[in-house]
């Protein structure tokens, strides 16, 4: 085959980086094997940190390096290897960050549930035991209904009154 393509090369509005890999000329979309990848903004971070300053990036890079080079610690890696494996860590972080946003949202929701249950506990403690002559079965049923509403609030309100 004498007319084999040289990479990278321009093809319309994209730069072809290799077989089945191209990037839009504006650098916004990367396509690899038919799947488009778009950079995602990091909404979690309020401070401007570069990936090079991230301890998590270094841990991921070290894990990848030491997995691919058994018996060779990351601390003794060649500077060129550090650059390459740090780039691999950046790619892993690009995938991890969207999942971390989802996990953070779930954690906030769980924390709200716990706070409602704690408030209910404190209210019950302040009220004390059921008054004498009260049916304990009905008293417990009422408490269980309150607890249920604290854990799974009705759709039209966030906390039972």
Image (spheres, rainbow, N blue to C red):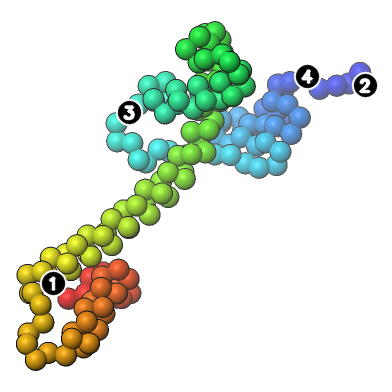
Q: Tell me residue 159's x, y (percent).
A: 23, 70
The residue that disc 4 covers is 6
Relative horizontal placement of residue 143, taking residue 69 as reference (left or right): left
Q: Earlier in the sequence, mark 4 or mark 1?
A: 4
Q: Tell me residue 133's x, y (percent).
A: 9, 91
The residue that disc 3 covers is 48
Q: CA distance from mark 4 to mark 1?
A: 74 Å
- Identity of the residue drawn at 74% across and 20% down: 7
Q: Earlier in the sequence, mark 2 or mark 3?
A: 2
Q: Earlier in the sequence, mark 3 or mark 1?
A: 3
Q: Nearer the viewer, residue 80 or 37?
A: 80
Quick one: label 2, few (<14), some, or many (20+) residues within 10 Å? few
Circle number at residue 124:
1
Q: CA distance from mark 3 to mark 1?
A: 45 Å
* Count of all numbered marks drawn on residues in the image: 4
Q: CA distance from mark 3 to mark 4?
A: 38 Å
Q: Dividing the picture into quarters, in which one does residue 52 lie? A: top left
């Amino acid at each position: 085959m004498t007319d084999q393509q040289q990479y990278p090369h321009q093809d319309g509005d994209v730069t072809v980086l290799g077989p089945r890999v191209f990037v839009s000329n504006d650098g916004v979309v990367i396509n690899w094997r038919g799947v488009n990848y778009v950079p995602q903004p990091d909404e979690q971070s309020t401070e401007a940190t570069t990936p090079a300053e991230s301890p998590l990036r270094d841990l991921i890079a070290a894990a990848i390096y030491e997995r691919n080079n058994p018996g060779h610690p990351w601390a003794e890696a060649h500077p060129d290897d550090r650059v390459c494996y740090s780039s691999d860590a950046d790619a892993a972080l690009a995938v991890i960050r969207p999942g971390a946003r989802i996990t953070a949202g779930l954690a906030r929701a769980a924390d709200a549930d716990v706070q409602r249950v704690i408030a209910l506990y404190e209210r019950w403690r302040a009220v004390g035991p059921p008054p004498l002559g009260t049916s304990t079965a009905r008293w417990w049923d009422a408490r269980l209904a309150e607890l249920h509403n604290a854990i799974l609030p009705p759709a039209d309100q966030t906390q039972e009154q």
